[in-house]
Image: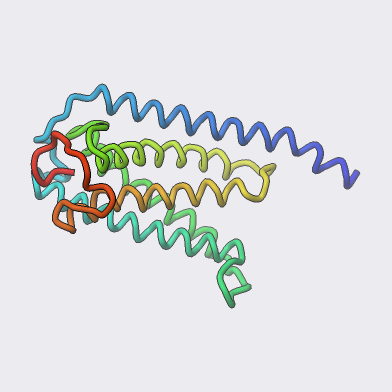
Amino acid sequence: MSHARPALRRPEGRLALVLAFAAAAAVFVAVFLFGRANTPDYTATLFGQADTDAVRLKAQLATGVLGLAALQLLLALWMYGRLPGVRRVPGPVPLTHRIVGAVLFVLTVPITVHCIQAYGVQLNGSRVAVHSIAGCFFYGAFAAKVLLVRSRHLPGWALPLAGGALVVAVVVLWYTSALWYFNGNDVPLLSLGHHHLPPGQV
């Protein structure tokens, strides 16, 4: 009996992975197509802020999201026993991880809504293209993680992979938007190419 249980879990684990990848792909495609079909409105506001004020606010919010992502990574390493010299995982750590994740997601929503309304998904220019693809990928990865976290039949690498993908997406999004803004509309490696957005817009 003790040897049958893992064998029974394998099909369920595979199904959970397939569903998660399917959800990620579906969300990615949906966000991408919606953004491509959207007509950019450069006058769109973010919490009442427009033009360069909206861009500055969005860069600040994105930096907050980056900080939360770093905290999430730290908490995840703690829960998986990967922090050097730390063995005990206090009870509040998993709950804190879930709360921080929820706050992070909620904070991305107004940023994304403004991006879609003002610019849509654009592929003209290396920085803009990478930013657009990373944004679609973020929500696809988030959908996958929501499904994976509800399954108890996963291989040990599944959740860390999904969580790591989210952190990488946040870093790329911040690098191609907030850092670009704070650095005077320039970032290393992705400054080649041009786009049709008004000066100072992200």
Q: Is residue 141 left or right of residue 189?
A: right
Q: Nearer the viewer, residue 149 or 17?
A: 17
Using the image as rendered, state which of residue 130 and residue 73 is in the foreground: 130
Q: Is residue 28 above or below residue 74?
A: above
When asked about the image quadrant of residue 193, the answer is top left
How far from the left and from the top, in percent, is residue 195?
A: 17, 36
The residue that appears at 53% across and 64% down in the rendered structure is 93
Task: Determine whether 60 is above or below 194 in the image.
Answer: below
User: Which of the image's four quarters has the N terminus?
Assistant: top right
Q: Is residue 33 above or below residue 197?
A: above
On the rendered structure, is 12 left or right of 200?
A: right
Q: At 11% from the left edge and 44% from the top edge, which residue is drawn?
A: 48
How many dots with numbers? Answer: 0
Determine whether 18 is above or below 146 in the image: above
Question: In the drawing, does residue 65 fall left or right of residue 79?
Answer: left
Residue at 17% x, 38% y is: 194
Q: Position of residue 126 (x, y in %)?
A: 27, 40
Residue at the spot x=53%, y=60% of the render? Answer: 76
In the rendered image, residue 202, in percent from the top left (x then y), is placed at 19, 44
Residue farthest to the top, as pictured: 37
Colour basis: rainbow
Q: Give percent across and percent down for residue 83.
A: 56, 70
Left or right, 73 with respect to 111, comes to right
> Which residue ends up furthest to the bottom in the rendered image?
85
